[in-house]
Image: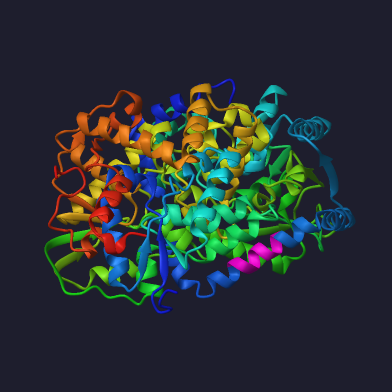
Amino acid sequence: MTDASRPRVGLFVTCLVDAMRPEIGFAAIRLLEDAGCDVEVPTRQTCCGQPAYNSGDDVSTAAVARQVIAAFEPFDHLIVPSGSCAGTIQHGYPALLASDAEWGPRAARLAEKTHEIISYLVDIRNYTPGRLRLEGSATYHDSCAGLRELGIHDQPRRLLATVDSLEMRPLDGENVCCGFGGMFCVKYPAISNAIVDEKADAVERSGADMLLAGDLGCLMNMAGKLNRRGSKVRCFHTIEILAGGGDGPAIGEKS
Amino acid sequence: MTATTRPGFKARSDAALANSTLKTAIDRTAERKRAAALARFAEYEAARSRGSAIKDHVIANLDHYLEMFERNATASGAKVHWAATEAEACDIVIRLCREAGAKRVTRSKSMLGEEIGLPDALGSAGIERVETDLAEHIIQLAGEHPSHIIWPAMHRTREQVAELFNADHKPPPADDEAASMVQSARHVLREKFLSAGVGISGANFLIADTGATCTVTNEGNAELTTTPPRLHIVTAGIEKLVPSTSHAMALLRLLVRAATGSELTQYTTFHCGPKRPGDADGPQEMHIVLVDNGRSEMIANEFRDMLRCIRCGACMNHCVVYRQIGGHAYGGTYPGPMGAVLTPVFDGLAPSRDLPFACTMNGRCAEVCPVEIPLPMLLRSWRGRSWRAGLESEPMRTGLVAWAGLARRPSLYRMASGIGVRALRLLGRSGWIGSLPFAAGWTRHRDLPSPTGGTFMERYKAERGKRPEDRR
């Protein structure tokens, strides 16, 4: 029997964090444990299926969805360090499997207990980080799925405000898409580039040392553009900062 | 209008991106005063729900309201015509113009008219067409189609308009200031208003319980188009129906704020039948052409919600893609998110299949839509249809199917991702990868951060191995 006050959460790492920046996954574990959770990482996970979902391949998406549901339904919560993947599990899966008598209800139950990590920490766990200190200034980009599908807006700002010496600066068009869009950025690279170029302009105008966001896809897009432009802005996932990783290498910096 | 005869979407969008004047023009107009207007509209969210409910109710009872509208419009002295297709709609309008012996027609801005190809149809029939909306006048002089549903000439800067007017207007405008150019257009158009045999307008609302049609403009050109000529022809999509005038007003409040950020249009006119005995003015005949053009099919399929659209343009004003490439690159009558949903309905999915994919799914369009249309979901439905119809390229299909196969075999997936990560780390020893042949779409414009080490799953397994108390 587990301690009832300690929820047993399954961490959905996401394919991008798994391959490109595992530090985000470890930051997630640290924060969740600090917030009183027992964290497990089910091995039968790969990706939430968005590449297929956004390409219109509903059959493949449904197959991946069933695998995620089966792997995570034993847990009290599924926690994911990405608004985009959380949105797919919370909204995409139930819609996709709605007409399936067995999997429809299971998808709906999993959706109920799936949370993007920052909103989970604030809204469900009522979490405040311990004393954190980071010299410098940062600006925050609202990733679209987190903002519009899940209503994540105040939570990251509230947690970041607890970090000593970190000055938060406003970002023009903070709620405007960065142009990533998953497959969109490689299918329509010229349009994507024009969009992320404007985002990079805004980030540089903010004068902040750091750019923070809650989705690695958007971060890789913006960081990659900023680096190509020769910008010195350092990019981190919000939870890396909250887990005390702001002194470590930023995205693209040699570890 | 079909997209097949034009260069493809990618060529069109590349050309648009290379056109810096276009970007300047778009940046000058988009978003404007909308946020401030909505902030003053305290009950906006409630109004939005009500507007959506009105449209849903009409769509669910369309046959009832169509019959009611026809009955009441006929009783007011108007003649109602039914057109199943764009070709039928144009034929009816051309026949009416010919029967009236009209050599010149004036037209007040109507996107439905563009949808059915009426400008070209009038041209082919040898009937002179005079566009009376200022922006449509600009478009006509330039020989173009609208690039925005509210500001048809949004893609042209004031400087470019001055060039067109200087070349065409006799005498040319006094100077290049907006006021002088408007004055010049007014002067040129005034004579034509009075000499046209037929005036053609669209309708923002068709009001079932009175049989009236409603047009809104900011220039007063609709009134001058519909009043002096002997014939007034209205062309309207059947989704424009509302039960009553008060329902029209509820939607009008949403339409104007969402479209321009104003509280009300300068001119809101209800046209109810032709001139009656004793009326000071008005047309001798009023004809209303109700156009289906794929709409009744949408009632029964996954695009039904799109019939709520009141053509405000908010979705395109807030679309990151539209704001980079403008309206013409979309290649259909309607651009932006709503156009990406509608163009495949009118032109077929095969020639327009890029449109539902050229979207980042950021959801801003649905957020600003005054009638709560889930635009990204509808675009996703087109993506599903495109996949099922096999319209994706073969490498794309094969790649995705292979990826999905891996994603369903976690141990095989780990092996593949482990290899991939190692390969990327070799290429990106500096921390960044500047060029990657199979991801050229990414690295042409931005660097790819190199993976920071082994995969999370590998590292997690290794770390947990060192912490036996955590092993499960």
Point out residue B21 in the picture as x, y percentages from the top left corner: 34, 35
Point out residue B246 in the picture as x, y percentages from the top left corner: 71, 69
Helix, strand or loop for the magenta stretch, by majority: helix
- Asked if residue B67 lies left or right of residue B232, the reply is right
Residue in the foreground of this view, choosing between B312 and B264: B312
Q: From this view, report whether residue A25 is shown above or below residue B41.
A: above
Image quadrant where one finds the N terminus of chain B: top right
Q: Is residue B356 visible?
A: yes
Residue in the foreground of this view, choosing between B128 and B19: B19
- Residue found at x 61% / y 54%: A95
- Residue found at x 63% / y 49%: B222
Q: Which residue sits furthest bottom?
A: A5
Coloration mode:
rainbow
Point out residue A129 in the picture as x, y percentages from the top left corner: 24, 73
Span of residues in magenta: B48-55
Q: Which quarter of the figure has residue A3?
A: bottom left
Q: Which residue sits furthest front?
A: B468
Point out residue B91 in the picture as x, y percentages from the top left corner: 79, 30
Q: Is residue B32 visible?
A: no
- Asked if residue A234 lies left or right of residue B442, the reply is left
Q: From this view, report whether residue A57 is shown above or below residue B15.
A: below
Residue in the foreground of this view, choosing between B221 and B325: B325
Q: From this view, report whether residue B312 is shown above or below residue A179.
A: below
Count of marks placed on residues: 0
The question of residue B262 being in magenta is answered with: no
- Asked if residue A129 lies left or right of residue A15, the reply is left
Residue in the foreground of this view, choosing between B97 and A120: A120
Q: From this view, report whether residue A167 is shown above or below residue B102.
A: below
Q: Which quarter of the figure has residue B212?
A: bottom right
The question of residue B49 being in magenta is answered with: yes
